[in-house]
């Protein structure tokens, strides 16, 4: 029942995870499990947060854990957050690495491809 | 000496015969045998007549044999026990019957007269015996005896037959008739065992259904065209008497095997016949009675007559029972069809109907039954009983029937006929199949074809109706959803929360609706209404009425005038008559509300700091009502900022087991208890608390929260899901106060983190805890206070909580924690103008 918050697709060779709506304490753990289940063997992962209207520290925890796991596996990952928006605000406040963040999907795909 | 006074010659001594009568010759050739014996029976003198009768030579007897030596074994005893004592006592015996064994071993029946001569001392000296040949007389006696025995046997047979006929007359079923028939051969003919086979017309075979010896009953049915003796008898309709094993071996080897195995010496096979239904002149074989004997047995003519009679009587009884069976089966079938049709009618929905159909069929008319319908992308399958047929074979046959529309009743490729597949046809289209396996040992699908076709026709009709019902239901639901889903106006000056809950039971959609729209930029209309009836008609009518209200509402008219126009509207749209409506117009500039209720339940208003109250003025009859108050009236009240108005339909408070005033009280109490709850989710939780999931009626609610509270005070439970609802409420409140987007994001994040902290950590062990949120806004700053009564746990700087609290500090300008009696976080963020 996480379909309203998370959907999966392919972006070139990378797995594309689209998040939408409000991500908070109530749904973050479930969404995290779903992402891990779907992207376990991905060669690269792009997480699109442009449609996220709210992101709290539970969401940050989820992304932090995902990035950590993928880094350990050597899987490239990008978080697409757009120019403005709730997700960008929260992630910037939490000082996520600049190399993780991309402003649009094409750029993220290019970076992973290159 | 005789004296004769008549005219004839007076005879005083022997007449002289005209030839020389030699006494010796007289002795030797007398018409009877003479024996002279010593007292111990030793023969001392015998005449020629005796020797001629017995075939002995004189020398073999005289001095060699005693009389008793010549007697049969049984007669020797008789001689000792009767003859000798009697003779000794009476000195003579008369006409004692003996069987004398002749020299050639044959018996000679004789009558014996003896006289015992004694000497002067009275001691036995000589026995003189005459022997009469009793061959003919004894034969006659035997005949008499045999005749009597035959008469007795005949009488016994007649008695047995009479009993059987009485039993047969009382046997209502073929099985009971067979039970009566099988009891006859034992007492009537002394048969060792008997079995009845009945012809199964639809299967063209004979099955053993009754037997005195249960072993025969386990045998497989005998095909009518086989070479077995039973089949032969059934085909020819003739009585067969197999008098010996040799005879059986010659004609029926299988029967000979059985006879050897069961140690039988003779078998009688009797066809049980009745006048044929098709041709009254011809006899129809309905069964075969077989009985057998342990010893060789021939049947007399009279026995054969009785046997044939038994065959006719039994045949007639079977014929009668067959008619009874048919009549009873027809009645059962008719009852089954009627009951099934009724049982299906009470279930309007498709799947329950299909399931009920197959469950009723098993086991009464089938071992296994399945309904397949071509509805929806996946189709529908309802199945009951076992064993199911082989799936691929079944799939092939189902496909064939769907294509051809022709029933397939038997399947030669499978044992016991496999399964029958019948098409389900509606409006000339095959839309599914009914498949079944007939019960074991019962009539085949072919024999029941009329019944099965009838069943399939009725099932098709019931299932097609249910399918149409489902279709209409789906359309009605879709229509209703699309009508209710219309965008509600969004405005910082008010918020609208709605909830629609369909009836839990399998009822059609109701005609409840809600609506909210802006008549002018400053005038908001809210409506909740209820159309009479259910289903697609109610949904369409609801749509028309909803559109009519939107069209008729105007800046000048007001609620009373609008209701009058609706009254005229229903003159043209009759299905909308008697609809009820609660309608209110809110002047957002003046904070005034004008409302009217047309036969609808009163709105419930909660003003800040007051108990909720029902608005009981401005009431008039339902739309188009002739009995209700016709004059449409309205009422105008002031609505302070922060008021919440609840409109609802009767499903919310009406319960079958609760008085309506109790419902009103409960709603007011529940509503009051939720005054501080965030508006988002309020209507859903009211419906949940008042009616629960198992409600019998549709429920429709609309809650309007008016104006902007200066202080936002909310209380939420310790449930993470509630944070989103609070955020929605808070976002609307912040927007209404003109707070800029960045600050709104910041306050929402900080508030969420603070509440999450309370729920996740403060109430870690207390799921029933509550979190209080108070937000205030001033031209300079936004302040939010989040308070819980849980346990404060100092955050670990590296841990997850650290990040939440850090976020709060980052986005808010001033944050204080107070840990007296739980935790209170007070956070303040300067507004844009004040920040720079």
Image: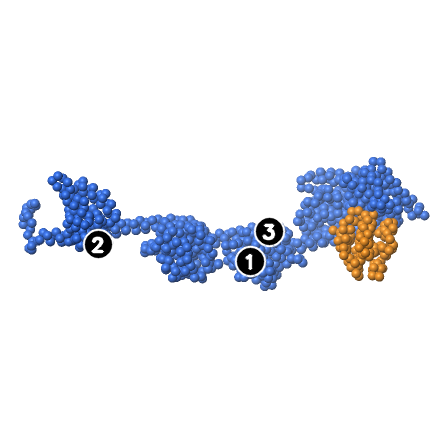
B251 to B16, vertically: above or below: below
Q: Is tag 3's residue or tag 1's residue first in the polypeptide sequence? A: 3
Q: Chain of mark 1?
A: B
Give the chain ID for the blue colour: B
Location of mark 1 (residue): B419
| Residue A30 percent across, percent down from the top left | 76, 49
Q: Is tag 1's residue or tag 2's residue first in the polypeptide sequence? A: 2
The reply to whether residue B25 is visible in this rendering is yes
Picture quadrant where residue B413 is located: bottom right
Q: Chain of mark 3?
A: B
Q: Are marks 2 and 3 in contact (CB under 8 Å)?
A: no
Location of mark 3 (residue): B356
Discs 1 and 2 carry the same chain letter: yes
Location of mark 2 (residue): B103
User: Which residue is pictured at 66% across the width and 47% down the height?
Assistant: B505
Label 2 SS? loop
B240 to B128, vertically: above or below: below
What distance separates the C-alpha of mark 2 from that of mark 3?
92 Å
The reply to whether residue B636 is visible in this rendering is no
| Residue B80 percent across, percent down from the top left | 22, 44
Indicate left or right for B740 with B344 as reference.
Answer: right
């Amino acid at each position: 029942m996480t379909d309203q918050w998370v959907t999966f697709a392919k972006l070139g060779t990378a797995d594309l995870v689209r998040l939408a709506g409000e991500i908070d304490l109530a749904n973050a753990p479930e969404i995290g499990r779903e992402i891990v289940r779907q992207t376990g063997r991905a060669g690269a992962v792009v997480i699109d947060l442009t449609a996220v209207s709210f992101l709290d520290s539970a969401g940050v925890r989820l992304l932090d854990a995902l990035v950590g796991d993928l880094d350990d596996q050597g899987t490239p990952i990008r978080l697409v957050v757009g120019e403005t928006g709730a997700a960008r605000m929260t992630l910037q406040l939490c000082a996520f690495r600049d190399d993780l963040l991309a402003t649009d999907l094409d750029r993220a795909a290019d970076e992973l491809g290159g | 000496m005789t004296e004769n006074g008549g005219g004839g010659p007076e005879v005083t001594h022997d007449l002289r015969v005209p030839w020389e009568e030699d006494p010796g010759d007289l002795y030797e050739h007398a018409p009877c045998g003479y024996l002279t014996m010593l007292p111990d029976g030793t023969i001392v003198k015998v005449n020629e007549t005796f020797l001629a009768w017995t075939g002995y030579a004189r020398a073999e007897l005289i001095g060699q044999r005693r009389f008793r030596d010549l007697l049969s074994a049984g007669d020797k005893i008789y001689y000792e026990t009767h003859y000798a004592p009697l003779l000794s006592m009476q000195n003579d015996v008369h006409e004692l019957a003996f069987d004398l064994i002749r020299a050639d071993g044959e018996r000679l029946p004789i009558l014996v007269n003896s006289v015992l001569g004694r000497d002067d001392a009275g001691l036995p000296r000589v026995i003189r015996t005459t022997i009469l040949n009793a061959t003919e007389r004894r034969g006659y006696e035997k005949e008499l005896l045999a005749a009597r025995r035959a008469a007795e046997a005949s009488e016994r047979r007649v008695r047995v037959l009479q009993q059987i006929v009485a039993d047969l007359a009382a046997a209502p079923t073929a099985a009971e008739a067979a039970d009566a028939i099988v009891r006859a051969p034992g007492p009537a003919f002394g048969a060792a065992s008997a079995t009845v086979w009945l012809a199964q017309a639809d299967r063209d075979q004979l099955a053993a259904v009754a037997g005195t010896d249960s072993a025969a009953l386990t045998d497989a049915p005998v095909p009518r065209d086989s070479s077995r003796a039973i089949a032969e008898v059934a085909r020819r309709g003739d009585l067969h008497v197999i008098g010996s094993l040799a005879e059986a071996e010659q004609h029926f080897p299988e029967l000979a095997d059985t006879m050897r195995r069961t140690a039988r010496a003779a078998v009688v096979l009797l066809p049980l016949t009745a006048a044929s239904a098709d041709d009254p002149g011809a006899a129809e074989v309905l069964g075969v009675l077989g009985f057998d004997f342990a010893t060789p047995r021939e049947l007399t003519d009279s026995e054969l007559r009785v046997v044939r009679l038994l065959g006719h009587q039994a045949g007639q009884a079977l014929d009668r029972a067959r008619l009874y069976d048919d009549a009873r089966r027809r009645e059962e079938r008719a009852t089954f069809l009627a009951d099934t049709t009724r049982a299906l009618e009470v279930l309007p929905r498709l799947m329950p109907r299909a399931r009920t159909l197959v469950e009723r069929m098993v086991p009464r008319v089938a071992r296994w039954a399945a309904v397949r319908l071509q509805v929806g992308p996946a189709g529908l399958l309802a199945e009951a009983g076992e064993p199911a047929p082989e799936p691929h074979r079944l799939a092939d046959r189902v496909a064939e029937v769907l294509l051809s529309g022709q029933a397939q009743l038997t399947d030669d490729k499978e044992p016991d006929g496999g399964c029958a597949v019948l098409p389900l046809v509606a409006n000339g289209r095959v839309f599914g199949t009914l498949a079944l396996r007939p019960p074991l040992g019962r009539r085949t699908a072919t024999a029941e074809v009329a019944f099965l076709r009838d069943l399939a026709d009725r099932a098709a009709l019931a299932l097609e109706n249910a399918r149409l019902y489902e279709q209409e239901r789906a359309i009605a639901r879709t229509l209703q959803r699309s009508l209710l889903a219309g965008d509600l106006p969004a405005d910082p000056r008010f918020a609208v929360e709605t909830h629609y809950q369909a009836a839990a039971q399998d009822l059609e959609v109701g005609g409840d609706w809600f609506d909210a729209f802006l008549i002018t930029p400053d005038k908001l209309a809210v409506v909740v209404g209820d159309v009479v009836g259910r289903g697609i008609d109610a949904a369409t009518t609801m749509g028309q009425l909803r559109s009519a209200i939107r069209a008729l509402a105007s800046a000048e008219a007001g609620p009373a005038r609008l209701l009058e126009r609706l009254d005229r509207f229903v003159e043209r749209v009759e299905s909308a008559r008697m609809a009820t409506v609660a309608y209110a117009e809110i002047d957002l500039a003046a904070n005034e509300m004008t409302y009217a209720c047309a036969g609808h339940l009163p709105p419930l208003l909660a003003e800040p700091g007051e108990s909720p109250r029902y608005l009981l003025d401005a009431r008039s009859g339902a739309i188009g009502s002739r009995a209700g108050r016709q004059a449409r009236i309205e009422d105008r009240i002031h609505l302070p900022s922060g008021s919440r108005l609840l409109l609802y339909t009767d499903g919310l408070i009406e319960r079958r087991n609760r008085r309506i005033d109790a419902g009103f009280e409960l709603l007011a109490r529940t509503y009051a208890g939720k005054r501080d709850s965030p508006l988002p989710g309020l209507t859903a939780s009211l419906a949940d608390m008042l009616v629960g999931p198992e409600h019998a009626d549709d429920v429709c609610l609309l809650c309007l929260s008016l104006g902007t509270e200066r202080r936002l005070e909310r209380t939420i439970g310790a449930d993470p899901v509630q944070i989103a609802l609070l955020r929605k409420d808070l976002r609307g409140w912040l927007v209404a106060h003109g707070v800029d987007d960045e600050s709104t994001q910041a306050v929402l994040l900080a508030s969420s983190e603070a509440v999450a902290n309370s729920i996740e950590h403060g109430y870690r062990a207390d799921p029933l805890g509550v979190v209080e949120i108070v937000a205030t806004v001033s031209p300079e700053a936004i302040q939010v206070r989040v308070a819980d009564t849980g346990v404060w746990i100092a955050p670990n700087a590296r841990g997850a909580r650290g990040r939440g609290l850090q976020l709060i500090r980052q986005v808010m300008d001033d944050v204080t924690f107070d840990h007296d009696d739980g935790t209170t976080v007070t956070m303040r963020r300067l507004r844009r103008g004040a920040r720079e």
